[in-house]
Amino acid sequence: MTESNITTLKTYEPAKITAFQVDAFEGVSNVALKENSTAMLTCISEGFPTPEISLIKGETLAFGVSIVQSEISIRGQLNKTFTNVNRQMTGKYACVASNKHGQSAQSLYLNILYPPSVIRTDNLYIKEGESLNITCTYEPGNPPETAVQWLKAGIIYSNKTLLYQSVARTDAGIYSCIATNTYDNEHTNFTGVDSKQFILHVLYQPIVQRFSLEQFDDNLNVTVSENDSVVFNCIAEGFPSPDMRLLKDSVKLAEFNGKSQGNTTTRLRHAMPSAGRQDMGQYTCVASNTIGLGGKEMFLNVLFPASRKIPIKDFSNNGNEANIYLGGEVTFSFSALANPLPTSAEYVWHKCSDTNICTIIANSSRSYIETYREISNLTVVNITESDYGMYILQVGNGIGKPHTEVYFLKRLSSLPIKPITSVSHIGLISAGLSVVFILIVIFVVACVHRHLRRRETIGQDVGYLFVVPTTPYYNDTTAQPPVVPWDRLDVQGEAIALSSSLPAENVDVQSEIYSEIDPQQVEDIISRDDGATNEAQLMTEHIRYKDVGPPEQDDEPQYIYGRCGH
């Protein structure tokens, strides 16, 4: 066969698409592919000359032209592989085959399936008792139909909206919002899921869950013995994590701060190596945070033996000693410090002497015992010789050794003088003494001043002296006191006959004054000793001296005999 014969066998044929498909989806024009999957598109054409094949998405050339040529075959084919298919590839695709004699096109729709996307919710802090309403928001996937659920610890709580009328502390936790879409046909099954979590923090005031002593469980009234070791344990829960304090009678003993915001439990431990009687009392464990506080109380009872509560009032400088006269009475008192308190039968009074052994005292007509709780009194009346001696009180409460208290009753030889103990009496006496002292000072100053003035008037060659009795005899305070020359006084300060003469015109005055002095009454007043009652007495009768005469010379100065008031 010649070359010209071969040429005549070729027939010109326009381009034609014989197949356009996704592998495994033969004949399917709407192909659903899962996001991130792998797929290959194949486009096959026929025509002569061999067609050019183009793959177009929408109206845009998508992947260029791929031409498979064969010198023998007139078939044309384009294969395009998609790896990690994503949602942006969703759309209509066309395969176009063309040559100079014509073109042909065929299309299919790629439906990329992907899940919805949940929008994150921030962690939430809310007080207990408040309401809560949270909606799960999301961006829809493909297909857009979406189911939404709220889950906590794998349990479904609600759909789309998380709603609480009153939040409780038990509602705190991690919540997940789950959004789901699905696609199902004979070629593709798809389920898309997305979820986001948030933490719900419920703020609430602390509560002390447990407050106890080690080895005593949850007993809130614990009894231990003196010198026992005691360990306090306190556990509290709250959010934020509470701070804790251990108090005894409102005094802080220990403190512990909460660890973190995420921890709702705080523990406090306090050890007391040796419990004493001073440790007995009410203990409180207090937990607090920014929301409020809570607490729990416990009473610690410490048993200890009896002892004297406070020092008794001394009967003498020797402590428990009383000095009482015959026929008197005495009361010995005792106040006990003990836990538990002694019973009345546990107060035992004894009387001891040098000749007899100590005997228990029983109530009688002259001695009786009064006991109430921590107080015991022994009273002895109409004391006789046999009552003097030593008294012993023994007090026990079943803890340790009994306490022994010793008293002594001694005899006074005479009745005691009751001391002045009234504050008002002491104040009155002190005030009276002060007034008397001031009056004496005023009197002395007045007398000295008056004496000096008279010496200036009379002259420097004659000495005179005021005769001052212990009590005044003047009722008239305006009269001038008489003056007596030195040579008219005896050694006792009494007036004697004047050796110098006074002027004649003064004889009547002097005679009248002297005639009023009675030496016997003056002596009686000086020698009288009536105690405090004499201090306020005043002499109202005139005293007369009959043996005193007028002065003999007229040229002598006048002297007035008298006494300064006391």
Image (cartoon, grey):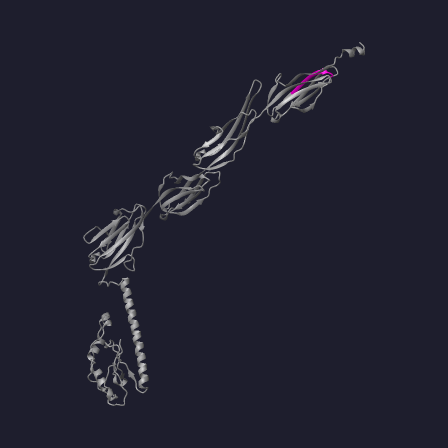
Return the residue nearer the eye: 89 or 528: 89
Give the position of the N terminus as an image quadrant.
Answer: top right
Q: Main secondary structure of the magenta part?
A: strand
Q: Horizontal and vertical percent for residue 181? A: 54, 25
Determine the residue positioned at 43% across, 40% down: 205
Specify the segment rendered in magenta: 41-49
Residue 46 within the magenta-colored segment of the rendering: yes
Return the residue nearer the eye: 98 or 550: 98
415 sits left or right of 103 in the view: left
Determine the residue positioned at 78% across, 12% down: 7
Q: Residue furthest toward the left?
A: 365
Return the residue nearer the eye: 224 or 293: 293
Q: Horizontal and vertical percent for residue 285? A: 40, 43
Q: Quadrant of residue 222?
A: top left
Q: Quadrant of residue 391?
A: bottom left
Determine the residue positioned at 28% across, 71% down: 436
